[in-house]
Image (cartoon, rainbow, N blue to C red):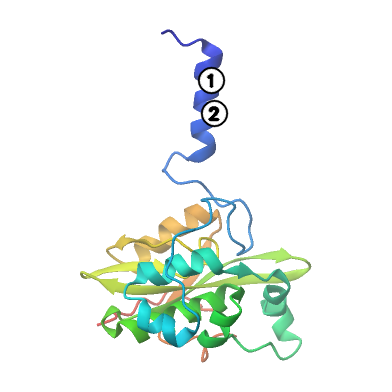
Amino acid sequence: MRLTTAVLLALALSVAACTTASGPRLATAPDDSPEPWPPRVTSYRDAATYGEALRTWRTPEDVSAWMGARFSYDASRAILLSESARSRGAAPAIHRPADFFAAPSGMCLDLARFAVETLAAIDAQLLPAYLMIEFEPVTVAGETMRLHWLALFRRDGRYWFVGDSKRPGHVAGPYASVEAFVDEYSRYRQRKVVAFRETASFERRQRTPATRAERQPLT
């Protein structure tokens, strides 16, 4: 069967809508809210309580699947935790994992904290940590936003990344280094990365943007 020029063009446009020259789609919005694709995760291990979840989940994929199915982005909370809003007064506390499990709504750091602390609880050998990315700032609802948080872990000597509010059910990896992931992530988000930092805690430096890339080994 011969395909007409119009049909071929339609097919090409369909493929272009799903991919870029480098492969995956590009982000559709500058903020940290989830993408409308891929479809929400529907198969995951649920639990009645956080304690039960810790006894049920065995892998990062278990944790990621739950986040992909249950996480709801809270845009108003993201505004309250933006850099400019925090400079004018006290910011709300980052949700503790048990509280987040009971009501899985929040912003990027809420999800990243849940991922890091949950992975540490189910398998400390994964060496979970935070990845803080400082982008060039954007303005959302009149507030300045530049920092984005997600979780990383090590498996088979390589880096993997989860707990990303843009792709809450996505497990990215493996990567040979954090820098390799950040370079790809910058292209995906279509935002320039000013600096990034791998850190064991979000608390000490949460309010201070990095001035340079700091890549510390997890071992």
Frontmost residue, 39 versus 132: 39
What residue is drawn where x is 51% and y is 60%?
Answer: 167
Contact between marks 2 and 1 (CB within 8 A): the answer is: yes
User: On the picture, is 62 further left or further right than 29?
Assistant: left
Tag 1 secondary structure: helix
Frontmost residue, 25 versus 177: 25
Residue 96 in sight in this render: no
Image position, residue 67 (x, y; %):
50, 69
Mark carried by residue 13: 2
Q: Amino acid at mark 1?
A: Leu
User: On the picture, is 107 further left or further right than 188?
Assistant: right
Toward which corner of the image does residue 124 lie, by quadrant?
bottom left
User: On the picture, is 74 further left or further right than 174?
Assistant: right
Which residue is denoted by mark 1 in the rendering?
Answer: 9
Image position, residue 82 (x, y; %):
68, 76
204 is higher (above) or lower (below) than 193? below
Work out which residue is located at the far left of the displayed protein and give it: 156
129 is higher (above) or lower (below) than 16? below
169 is higher (above) or lower (below) than 59? above
Toward which corner of the image does residue 175 lie, by quadrant?
bottom left
What residue is drawn where x is 29% and y is 78%?
Answer: 126
Please identify the quadrant where the N terminus is shown.
top left
Q: Amino acid at mark 2?
A: Leu
